[in-house]
Amino acid sequence: MTLRFFRLLACQLLLLMACLQAQAADGVVEITRAQIEASEEGYKLAAAYSFDLTHGLEEALQHGVQLHFTTRIELTRPRWYWLDEKTVTARQTVRISYNVLTRQYHVSILGSVQQSFPTLDEALFLIRRPSRWLIAARGALKPGEVYNVSLRMDLDREYLSKPIQVNAFNNSDWRLSSNKKTFTYRAE
Amino acid sequence: MNQALRYTLVVGGAVVSILLFLLASASDNSGFFDRYYSWLLGLNAAVAAALLVLVVVALARLYSRYKSGKFGSRLMARLVLLFAGIGILPGLVIFMVSVQFVSHSIESWFNVKIEAALESGLNLGHAALERELAVLSAAAQDGAIALAGQQGDAAQQVLERLAGAQPDMQSAMLVGAGGKRLAMAAVSPPRVGQEPDLPTPDMLAQAREPGGYAKPEGGIERDIRVAAAQAGSPGGTPEATGLRLRVIVPIPGPQRPARYLQMLRSAPAGLASNAEVLRTAYSEYQERFVARVGLRKMYIETLTLTLLLAIFGAIACAFLIAGNLAQPLLVLAEGTRAVAEGDLSPRPIVATSDELGTLTQSFNAMTGQLFEARSAVERNRAALQSAKAHLESVLANMSAGVIVLDADFNVVNSNEAVERILQHDVGGHVGHPLSAIDGLAAFAGVITKAFSTQSAQSAASGAHQRSHWQQQIEVPRRAGALEAPPAGEHDLTLLARGSRLPVGAGSGFIVVFDDISDVISAQRSIAWGEVARRLAHEIKNPLTPIQLSAERMQMKLAARLAPADAELLRRGTATIVNQVDAMKRMVDDFRDYAKAPPAQLQPLDLNALIGEILQLYLSGDESDMIHAALAPDLPAVMGDATQLRQVVHNLLQNAQDAMNDRAPDAASARIELTTEAIHYESAGGGAGTAVRLAIADNGPGFAPKILARAFEPYITSKARGTGLGLPMVKKIVDEHGGRIDIRNRADGSGASVSILLLKLAPAGNLA
């Protein structure tokens, strides 16, 4: 009887490990360009990503499942005497969906208007090369100060329904994320 | 099981229950846990792992205890198996059934028919939209032909007509080649700030293709929500669903740049809402179809976790319960082991009202009674031991010798007095026959004979037998001196009593004897005194007539005889007179010894007395023989000066006489006279003081036979002497209540006489 427990438990553990391993090897979002530009309104992130939807994701999208991509950026200022100061943390989520009736792709940055595209590539273009995004107001950064910027972009699983989340644990089709890209930025 | 662990278990159990409840409730599509579902799952898995570790540790401990055969582990193992089995088996059955149920039922939800129906519905929707688009396209083609060549107001009029021609029309618009609005007719005026919906370049490019651009668009959730919020009724108007049809056709004609007619029309309300419903259903169906694997996994994982938690919980509880059940037994086991080791202290009582509690209580009662009994035995044994020790001490310190013999006359036991009296080491011959001891063969023979005689007597006399015999036994004194003494001269006289006693299995004998030589000696002294007194009386009476007669004969006859005869007579009478005198003196001595006057005890300075006497001896004596060492602060004694003077005289005389007998080559003669105060502990425990007078010489010492009977009259080593000197001394010392002790000096050179005067004058009474 105990053997059975162990086997069950071993299955669970293997499953977890498989998840972790899969996470390391699945589809990767490559951040091809990332820079912060200062403008009159404030600091803007200009970024470009390179990725392809996996087969499973594409199929799910075409069956009407909405996908969300979240970009997270964090600006920290190193402090020798304490933990680094988190100056700016911002996130932006883009939703892509497909209307099976009109056969159109819709992309919208959450909280903003949506755009429609007839093809997936056009829709994805907006996600791969998003427009400049205001991450901080003008006075948020101290000019001349050097900040560490860390940026990552991934398929946000939090917006998926729970069963798909569970599925995503051990299905590499459902994982799409970038490595954390870090660079320094001297505020202007 | 201590308190902290108990509380930890309770709290942990509550937490686990909450987690499990949350996990189970998160399995429906409630949405709150959507974001934290993975966390919840992980947390539950971690708890399960922790419980597993706990269970494994507990099982390992139980196993090692079981292996080492520790008490209670078998019971514990059985209880744990029992409880775990009770907990696990039903859970397992439910788990199996649930898993089967879930995996099959979820699959069954997604069957082909529903999917096909949805697909068909979607196709229907598409077909309907196509039809509507075809109608709109036809109208647009007509409109385009009508607009061909028209400009300005004419075009506007055509647009107005077009916009009003069909129901649900939103707008008709004339668009330039760059996507600029040239003219527009709208059914409802555009809202303030709302841009007119212009076609994109892509659309225009597509419109140049044959057939133009004709597509449905819209139907976005956000727009629906916004519109519904504005309209106040969900999904009511065609605008609300946002589903509309857009048709763009080029306007024929040579006019350059090209112009396009765009017509926007809302989908018919029924079609739009139905299509939207269909679309939503299709999307959700597809989403769930995609998610079905995940859903099944989710259910199974939840079930598995639940099962694991239940199982581990059951095992942990089994340990708890088994521990609680086994603990009193362990206490009892500890108790029995402690009792076996002799520890009868009370055990901690298990505070339950059930049989186990009663059992421990009665166990404690039992150990208590055991303790009582053992301490009683202990006390008795101690009492016996002390009694025995007392008896042994009494026996050891008895002056009488006691020998215990077994039935074969082997020595079983003897006390110290035996050795002292017999001068034989009898105690060292335990287990040997008494007769085997060198020098005691005669003694053993007498005893054996006495016992057999007694048993013969008792056999003959029947019932009123005497239980013991009593006999006087002469034992040769052990040769303490150098030369072997003549036999029979100085035997020890023992008064022995023997009786039978039971020893072990057979009977034994006990012999008690005492050295009565001194008693006999004293009796002899008394007898001699009596004889002397009578003899003196009888002899003295005729002496005076004899003397007188002799003198008278001399007086009467001396003148009548010839000178030769007269001389004979004179010598004869002189001899008679002298001898009679001597006899008189002797008789007087005897009389004095027999009838010594009682001592008149008065406070007396012994040192002064001795000084007086020494004056007599030292004056005119050049030999430097007598040395006195007198203690300066000697307490006064009660004594009769005359008698004590005689004592000192006698002793000094004896010593001087002894000097004459010594070997010619000996060291110069020396007599030491010492007095000293002796402090001793009296019988009552208080401190006492005595005065000791000792006279020692370096002469030949006492012969052994003399030493034994020195205080008996007529025992003397001197050629001439009455042998009354030492008896007299002894008599006087006895009168003074003192003790006298004579011995040969330890180094064999000379004798020593020591007198202890115990009666001291009261303090300050010294004359």
Image (spheres, helix red, strand yellow):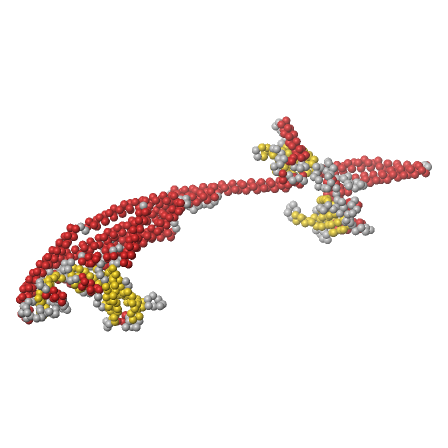
Counting from the top left corner in percent of width and height, residue B376 is at: 51, 41
Q: Quadrant of residue B67?
A: top left
Give above or below for B287 relative to B505. below
Q: Residue at x 14, y 52 (%)?
A: B117
Counting from the top left corner in percent of width and height, residue A86 is at: 30, 66
Q: Residue at x 84, y 35 (%)?
A: B542
Counting from the top left corner in percent of width and height, residue B224 is at: 16, 61
Q: In which quarter of the image is residue B80?
A: top left
User: In the image shown, does B119 or B432 lie closer to the viewer?
Assistant: B119
**Do we see residue B1 in this rendering?**
yes
Q: How many labels does the image show?
A: 0
> In the figure, is residue B653 to the left or right of A32?
right
> In the figure, is residue A128 to the left or right of B250?
right
Give above or below for B156 relative to B535. below
> In the figure, is residue B710 to the left or right of A151?
right
**Do we see residue A165 in this rendering?**
no
Counting from the top left corner in percent of width and height, residue B94 is at: 27, 46
Give above or below for B179 relative to B736. below
